[in-house]
Image (tube, helix red, strand yellow):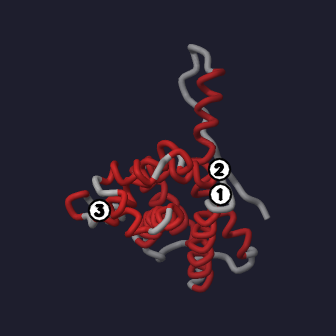
Amino acid sequence: MENPRATNDDLTARARIRNAAMDLYAQHGEDRVSLRAVATEAGVSLGLLQHTFKTKAGLREAVDELVANYFAQALAEVPNEGPPEQVSAARDSAVRQMLDANPPVVNYLRRALLEPDEISTGLLEVFIDLAQSEVGKLRQSGMASTARRESTQIVSVLVRLLGEYMLQPMVDAVWDRVATPGDTAKPTMSITVHG
C-alpha cells in the first residue's frame, strides 16, 4: 500500500505540517495543541504554517483528508471480484491491516470520533460519504445486497471497521482491572449491526 503520508525526505512543507498535526492531535487532542507546536514539530515557521493553512480549521481539514486517504487507499487495493463474502472480508482485512500499521491514525480517529464537537464532526461526514460511495459501488456491481437498506449497510460498514478500534481502550482497561493471575487470553469483541 502506498503510504498517504510518504516519507519526510519526499514531503513538501505542507505535507510535513499536516503529518506533524496528525501525530500531535492523535497524541494530545487538537484542543491541547497550538499551531506553534505543530510548526515546531514540522520544522517550519509559524508564519509558513499560517500562510499554508490559514486557520486551525484548515489544518484539521487537511488532517481529516489524510486519514480518509488511508482508508480509500486500503479499500482501493482490494479487487471487487469473487464471492461477496470474500470481497467484504478482504476489504475489512485491508482496513484492519492499515489501522494496525498506523497507530496515529487510530488515535486520531478515537479522539475525533469519540470526543466530537461541532467542528470535528467533519471527519465523521467524510467517513459517511466514503462508506456511502463504497456501498453504492458494491450494490451496483452486485457485490452487496440490494435487499437490505443502504442506510443499514453504511452503518454496518462503519461500525464493523471502526467499532473494535474505538472500544479497544475500554476493553483493555476493564481487562487490566479484573484479570486474575490465571487469566491468559483477553476477551475479543465481535460487533454486529442488525436492521
Distance from Cα at disc 1 to Cα at disc 3: 28 Å
**In this rendering, is residue 131 above or below 94?**
below
Please state which amino acid type lies under the numbered disc 3.
Ala
Q: Quadrant of the C terminus?
A: bottom right
Q: Secondary structure at mark 2?
A: helix
What whole-number distance in Å separates the C-alpha atoms at marks 3 and 2? 27 Å
Q: Secondary structure at mark 1?
A: helix
Pick the residue in front: 137 or 84.
137
- The extreme top residue here reads 181
Q: Hey, which quadrant is residue 141 in on the image?
A: bottom right
Q: Earlier in the sequence, mark 1 or mark 3?
A: 3
Question: Which residue type does callout 2 highlight?
Answer: Leu
Residue bearing mark 1: 159
Q: Is residue 72 above or below residue 24?
A: below
Residue holding disc 3: 6
Q: Which residue is mark 2?
A: 114
Nearer the observer, disc 1 or disc 3? 3
Visible in this render: residue 71? no
Which element is circle 3 on?
Answer: loop
User: In the image, what residue occupies the spot 65% across and 49% down?
Assistant: 115
Residue 132 position within the rendered picture, expressed as x and y whole percent measured from the top left: 62, 75
**Figure quadrant of residue 22:** bottom left
Mark before the other along the chain sequence, 2 or 1: 2
x, y percent for residue 63: 46, 62
- The crowding category of the residue bearing disc 1, from other C-alpha atoms within 10 Å (few below 14, some 14 to 19, many at least 20), is some
Spot occupied by residue 43 in the image (x, y as percentages of width and height)? 28, 53
